[in-house]
Image (cartoon, rainbow, N blue to C red):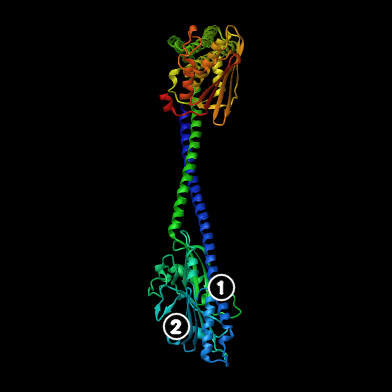
Amino acid sequence: MHRVKPQKQKLRRNLAFKVCALLCITALLSWLVFEQIVQSKMAVLKTAQIEKLLTAVALVNNELGSLRDILALLNSNSLLTENADITPETQRQQVQRYFADFGRAIDHISQIRWINQSGQEMIRVDFKADNTRVFPPSQLQNKYSRYYVNEGLKVEAPKIYLSPIDLNVEHGEVEHPFQTTIRATLQTNQKQHLIKGLLVINYNLNRIFQDVRALHDEQVQLQIIDSKGFWLLHPNPEQEWGFMLKHPEHNMNLSKRATWSLMQDNLIKNGDIIEGELLSYNTIKLFKQDDSDSTFLTTNKEIKAHSNKLFILAITPQSILTSIQVNAIYIALLCGLVTATIGILVILREYQFQHKLLALSQDLITEKSDLATLNSQLKSTLEQQQILQDSLVEAEKLSSLGMMVAGVAHELNTPIGGALISVSSAQGTMVNLKNAIEQGLSKRKLDDSLALIEEGLRLATNNMTRAADLVQSFKRMAIDRVTEESMEFYLLQLVQDIFLTLKAKFKTTKLTITHQIAPNILLNSRPGILSQVLENLIINAINHGFTGNQSGQIIVSAEQQNDEVVITVSDTGCGITSDMREDIYEPFVTSARSKGNTGLGLYFVHQWVTKILKGQIELHSELDKGTEFVLYLPLSVTNNAEIKES
């Protein structure tokens, strides 16, 4: 005893250490799961951002890239050069018609103008929907104050000037509805040109901006920002065109300084978290283009140095990132909880196993008192036998129970008698050993006596165990045990127990009984009820299937099919008439009432199978060819509340 207590303390210390280590591992695992989930979700978002960003950049580049060719094509017509054969007014009218036809032929042109070097519109044609409007001289305006005229006059042909993107202005007011416009200008300062000045095309970008806006979704939002930080496209339209609508506060340089500063230093970014948002962007430069240029994208150094540029951004809001992190936390905590639970269960199971080993070592100390305990158990078993016999007398109304009791009583006599003989032999050996000690004990005499005592105790223990098993088997099979919990058991062992119980019954007949059952069929059901069912069917076959001293065979077979087991009890007897088969499961139906049968056996079998075991029973029988009862039972029956009610 003095060594057991320190060992228990050591076990507790080991348990505490293992639990602490498990918690540390669980925390690390949860963190790794969290990081993995967040990184994988972020990778998906980055891919979506890059795809949408590249699509938006391609849309804008394709439109802006075609402007140079359109303007060069417009300038290539000979109608724009002086023709001495016709009057200037006639030539001007021809140019107007040419501009009108040209604008109708090409989508998204909203305006074609020819402006002289003083900024005065000389020819102007507007295009709105399907309407083409040629302005008379009286309605032409002077545009010298407009920035694109001054900038365009500084660019020598054949270079083309592209203006910043803004909203179209007429008579000093922003045109409604908004017309997102970019202007391309080309100088016409050659001697042969009809008008010395600028060819100006207003190109409507409304459709392009709508296409870019259509790429928005809940996770990725696209924005277009000019070189001064004003939004040209924003998920919230109220933030757009701040420099045109007198809202200077609608500027990224004011609301998101860190993001704006990064955009000034880097041409491209893919998937960086800035100011709590996931950001990817690309930069487009609108610059003066000559014949050698073929793209609006250039180097970092050139774009940083140029003021006329666009930023196209793909942004995932902070709320989406927060949602991803929260979901990742939930999953990580769940994984940690499952890991901790499994680990603790394993640790506790190991602790319990080691604790049992200590308990077993302590049990060895108390083995000296087992002999007295065994005698007490023997007396108790004899008393239980008397009680059992009294109970069997009261249960004679059920013939199947009467048969079972007779078999159990017969089988109990052998182990109990054997146990009494073994104990008596051991006691006699102890008396002889005591006398030998008084007269002088030799080592051989001691060894022989101990061997006899050990063998006697072993036989007594085996016999008592067998007697206890028989008693317990009877209890499981009794009707009043339906309230017991379901338990796992092997069908083969159950059938073998039944065969043993009925062994005495078969000794008085010429019948043989065999089984065809695999040893691995495991059920979680009511073994006592199932054994009563099988025993009743076997006894029913003995009493009703064979006459006189007739020989025959009874076979119990079983086969597992998915989640149920099919048990068959068949005999080679005389069979059952068709009239009897129709009412076979009704109470008090019997063909041998004169022999004292009550007719309740198969009624109880049907009730037990369908109500308690949750299965089905079928009968197949032909006269002179035998009878077969087939049981279809689930492998698991756990609804104890319904069983108790049944």
Q: Earlier in the sequence, mark 1 or mark 2?
A: 2
In percent of width and height, residue 478 lies at 46, 17
Q: Is mark 2 on a helix, strand or loop?
A: loop
Residue closer to the observer: 438 or 551? 551
- Residue 274, placed above or below residue 432: below
- Residue 374, placed above or below residue 288: above
Q: Which residue is drawn at 52% across and 54% down?
A: 40
Q: Which residue is identified by label 2?
A: 146
Asked whether residue 307 appears in the rendered view, the answer is: no
Q: In this view, does 514 lie to the left or right of 223?
A: right
In percent of width and height, residue 13 lies at 47, 37
Q: Residues within 10 Å of mark 2 (few under 14, many from 20)?
A: few
Q: Is residue 78 left or right of residue 12?
A: right
**Amino acid identity at mark 1:** Leu
- Residue 341, placed above or below residue 567: below
**Amino acid identity at mark 2:** Arg
Q: How far apart are marks 1 and 2 (CA)?
A: 26 Å
Q: What element carries label 1?
A: loop
In percent of width and height, residue 336 lies at 48, 45
Q: Which residue is identified by label 1?
A: 297
